[in-house]
Image (tube, rainbow, N blue to C red):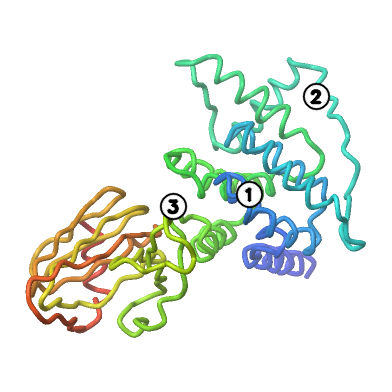
Amino acid sequence: MKSIFLFLMTVLITTTTMAQTLTDRQKALAACAALEAQGDLVRLETVVIDALERGVTINELKEVFSQLYAYTGFPRSLNALGVLQKVIATPKAQWKEGKPFERPILWDNAAEALKVGTEIQTKLSGQAFDFQFCPQDDYYLKSHLFGDIFAGNQLTPADREIVTVAALSAMKGVEPQLAAHKRGTVNMGNTQQQVDELCTWLDKEGYTLKSDFAKGANNVAYAQYFTGESYLNPLSPANLSEGEKTVLPMSNVTFEPGCRNNWHIHHGVRQILICVSGRGWYQEWGKPAIPMTAGTVIDIPEGVKHWHGAASDSWFQHIATHVKVADTESNEWLEPVSDEQYEEVKKQ
């Protein structure tokens, strides 16, 4: 009977752990990390305040931003700490200082820092890691990042990986490191469900949108012609005064991951698409899809049935404009791009 009871308790505990999802605290840490990585100090101030309101402590945020210098560089780390310093200059009673910072004993023993850091790196990677091509970086990673930095008393190893994945997700050109940390996050105490939810949440909230173009407002007027959420930002010249402002005949259109517009045909105009960020697709009826990345330009002939939209795992932005080829122009919206059609494109 005792064995049966213990078995049932084990199943219950395992099931509960596997069902664990991201907390508001973890989301707040991830938001702060993503905007620190992007250097977006205006939005960072807002999410820092939100994090403090949600119970994240001041000292935890100090630890987040100091750890991230190893991934994003000292300038962004120091700038983020400056934002935090500015915010807490006008404190609120409910904001918590958190447990006091304690100088890690490990900092006084370089050999022990290397030993402990090597063990942590091995646990995260799932295997021993040696970067003998560059012994300097191999030592910095083991002794300093996973030794000195991970020795801080404010964040758990699971928290640290949430922060790291969020920061890397918000950066360009770090895909190998992001993939490695997505795997390692589970090894450091998070569930696969939490990792998947984190990545989905970062996409949905726009933290993985890497662009200097504003996302704009929800594309409500054309929502019926899109699968997924899109956003519209009409472009205006910056050299005009407020009273002179005009909207140019072009707009920046932002697609959330997986979003695409319906098949459609432009009559009386050619459409020009210029991808400015992310990854997406353009496809003409009966032809293979063309991948679009920053700098890709598509000239769509008048009268051609086509669609365009985001890759399933990336935000996508393009500037769209039209060149008249006839006296009258119109847009003919057709059927949605089916899930089956979209899946076939993803296989290319």
Between the residue at mark 1 and the residue at mark 2, the CA separation in whole angstroms equals: 33 Å
Point out the frontmost of discs 2 and 3: 3
- Residue on which the image places disc 3: 211
Amino acid marked by disc 3: Ser
Q: Is residue 288 left or right of residue 183?
A: left
Image spot of residue 319 (x, y percent)? 30, 61
* Quadrant into which the C terminus falls: bottom left
Image height of 133 relative to 192, above or below:
above
Amino acid marked by disc 1: Leu
Amino acid marked by disc 2: Leu
User: Contact, CB < 8 Å: mark 2 with mark 3?
Assistant: no
User: Contact, CB < 8 Å: mark 1 with mark 3?
Assistant: no
Q: Return the mark for residue 90.
A: none
Q: Is residue 183 visible?
A: no
Between the residue at mark 2 and the residue at mark 3, the CA separation in whole angstroms equals: 40 Å
- Residue on which the image places disc 1: 41
Q: Residues within 10 Å of mark 2 (few under 14, many from 20)?
A: some
